[in-house]
Amino acid sequence: MAESNTLIDSFLSALHLLLNGDAVLWQIVGLSVRTSLIALLIAAPFALVCGYILAIRSFSGRRFILWLLQTSLAFPTVLLGLLLYMLFSRHGALGQWHWLFSSKALIAGQTLMAFPILVACVMGAVQAADPRLAETALCLGASKTQVMWRVLLECRFAVVAAFIHAFGRIISEVGCAMMVGGNIAGVTRTMTTAIALETSKGEFAQGIALGLVLLCTALLLNAVLMLVQGDAGSAGSGR
């Protein structure tokens, strides 16, 4: 009974933190959202081009690249964090950059996590698109770049869904963020690493509050995804 009362008290304290705009809590939320969005913006242009090329072209080594891409989708994030830690550590290949335990290392890890997700989703979307669209654009004198953007525009619902999926994946990740970020307050402390820290200290209020924010984020992202998919279905049936 005492444990139950403690959990209820922690939940009520979590609601108090959320509703009263606790500065530390919302700083952590803001940092998580900001680094995730920056990582997406960095990965996006490269992922769009790579996904498009992999979808439309056949070249030597393509199967090997696809194998690496599929493997990276299931790559343990804590192992990615370990590799980046070794890379950015003082004696690592990029140690002179002094990125370890900084927001730059955090963003680098999130970018590498988002990239294969975006590439795989864009590739699948382009492969599912009507091939006559690219052929028609070429016949009308469009350049290869113009054709690419026209095809991606046609696949915009799937591309948006890819971004939503990637954002949800990287904002909820903890292994890599802990390894390369170091969970430094105000610098690299994200929602997931803060939850791990507060839980280990036995202080559940902030952890529950951040967990509720992550849960609401997941619900919102899935609502947007369902809306996008619904719009995609409506657009498809309207052709």
Image (spheres, rainbow, N blue to C red):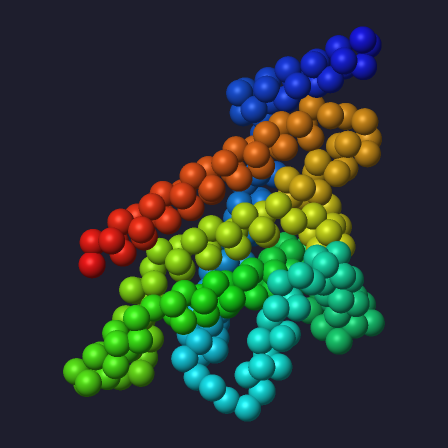
Q: Residue at x 50, y 36 (%)?
A: 219
Between 90 and 165, the one lying in front of the other is 165
Quadrant position of the C terminus in the picture: bottom left
* 40 sits left or right of 203 in the view: left
Q: Residue at x 64, y 43 (%)?
A: 190
Q: Residue at x 47, y 78 (%)?
A: 54
Query: In which image quadrant can residue 94 be found?
Result: bottom right
* 85 sits left or right of 36 in the view: right
**Residue 124 image offset from top left, x and y in percent:** 45, 67
Q: Residue at x 70, y 48 (%)?
A: 174
Quadrant position of the N terminus in the picture: top right
Residue 74 visible, this angle: yes
**Residue 229 image offset from top left, x and y in percent:** 37, 49
**Residue 147 image offset from top left, x and y in percent:** 29, 77
Between 42 and 112, the one lying in front of the other is 112
Between 126 and 21, the one lying in front of the other is 126
**Residue 108 image offset from top left, x and y in percent:** 62, 62
> Is residue 8 placed above or below 167 in the rendered structure?
above
* Residue farthest left in this picture: 140
Residue 188 visible, this angle: no
